[in-house]
Image: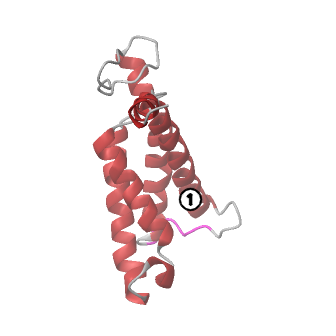
Amino acid sequence: MSATRLSDRLSSHQPLVLGLFRIVLGLLFASEGAATIFGILGRRSSPVGDWPFWYAGVIELVCGVLVLLGAATRSAAFLSSGAMAFAYFTEHQKNGLFPLQNGGLSPALFCWGFLLLVFFGPGALSLSALARRGGTTRDTARPVAGQAL
């Protein structure tokens, strides 16, 4: 198989892989928020109104669920990316330059993962695609050259 054919084959799966990435990222983010708000998954809950942790938990839970479902994905991802950038620079950066030094690996990865979704959209398997297509989950991304949607 030539490199071009392999590239075309891989590209044809981009919407599905992007959708799976979105689902996993949203689930992980929502679980972080649920742990912060409700004190589950081995974590203590943050008191209601405790700045910034309780508010971050609300953003993580709500936006994580929206991203998971693929509803208002770009907006939720934008807010999530900004929240994680804020968390990184206000809570972690003061403890060292690199994420491995300062404990900020999760916020850094979440920030960049959500920024990717802001620009690429929800991919396949999203509620927004389902609503636009009138009942199918077919992706709304642009087709690869020679590929029909």
What stretch of residues is rendered in magenta?
Answer: 45-50
Percent from the top left, x then y, of residue 119? 28, 44
Q: Is residue 106 magenta?
A: no
Q: Amino acid at mark 1?
A: Glu
Locate the C terminus and report the quarter of the image it occupies: top left
Residue sticking out furthest to the top? 134
Q: Position of residue 127 (x, y in %)?
A: 44, 26
Q: Main SS of the magenta segment? A: loop
Identify the residue shown where x is 48% and y is 48%.
64
- Label 1 belongs to which residue? 32
Task: Judge whether 107 appears above or below 6 on screen.
Answer: below
**On the rendered structure, is 110 left or right of 142?**
right
- What residue is at 47 percent from the left and 83 percent from the top? 102
The secondary structure type at the circle numbered 1 is helix
- Is residue 72 toward the left or the right of residue 135 in the image? left
Determine crowd level at label 1: few under 14, some 14-19, many 20+ residues with C-alpha closer than 10 A: many
In the image, residue 82 sits, relative to residue 3, either above or below, namely below
48 magenta-colored: yes
Q: Quadrant of residue 34?
A: bottom right
Rendered view: 115 above or below 13: below
Residue 108 in the image, given as x and y percentages of width and height: 42, 67
